[in-house]
Amino acid sequence: MNTEKATKIIFFLSVLPLIFALFLSLYFSFNLADLTTITYKFSRINSYIYAHSYGAILLTMFCGLSLGRLINEEVSGWILLIYFILVMAVWLSYQSFADWIGMSFLIFCWIVHAFLFIKARNLIGLPGWFNQGYIKVQIIIILLLSLITLINQ
C-alpha cells in the first residue's frame, strides 16, 4: 500500500467517531428510545461530549502538524502565533463543555484553522494530494460538528 492510499484511509478513519456522535444525535432527535432502553438525556449529552472532545483533539493534532511543519521554515511569526492561540482557544472551549456555546466555539476554531491552512498551505510544504485530502477532512469535520450542534439544539 502506498502512502497516498494509507493517508486517505487514515483521514476516513479519523472521521468515524464524529459519525458515531452524529448517530447519537439522530437517536435523540428521532426518539428511538422507544425501541431501546437508552434514555434521551444519555444520547444527547453523549453526542455533545463525543463530538466536542474528539473535535478538540483532532484540531489540536492538525494544528500541531502545521506548527511542526512551519517551525523550521522562514515564515512570519503571526502564522505560528495564530496556530498556537488556536490550540489554546480549543482547550478553553471546554469551559462550556457539552453545550451549544462550546460546540459553536469549536466550530469557529475549525473554520479559522481551515482558512489559515488554505492561506499557509504553500508554506507548510506538504504534497498536493495531501493538501486536498486535508482540506476535505476539515470540511467534513466542520459539517459533522455543525449537524450535531443543530440537531441537538
Image (tube, helix red, strand yellow):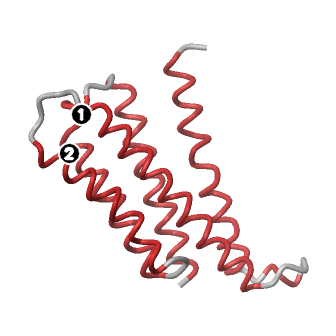
Q: Amino acid at mark 1?
A: Ile
Q: Amino acid at mark 2?
A: Leu
Within the image, what quadrant is residue 142 found in? bottom left
Quarter holding the N terminus is top right
Q: CA distance from mark 1 to mark 2?
A: 8 Å
Determine contact: label 1, label 2, CB under 8 Å: yes
Image point (51%, 77%), residue name: 97
The outermost residue toward the top is: 2
Q: Answer with mark 1 or mark 2, whichever residue precedes in sequence.
A: 1
Image point (75%, 85%), residue name: 40
Q: Which mark is residue 80?
A: 2
Image point (40%, 74%), residue name: 104
| Percent of width and height locating residue 103 | 46, 73
Q: Which residue is mark 1?
A: 71
Above or below: residue 132 compared with residue 39: above
| Percent of width and height locating residue 134 | 40, 38
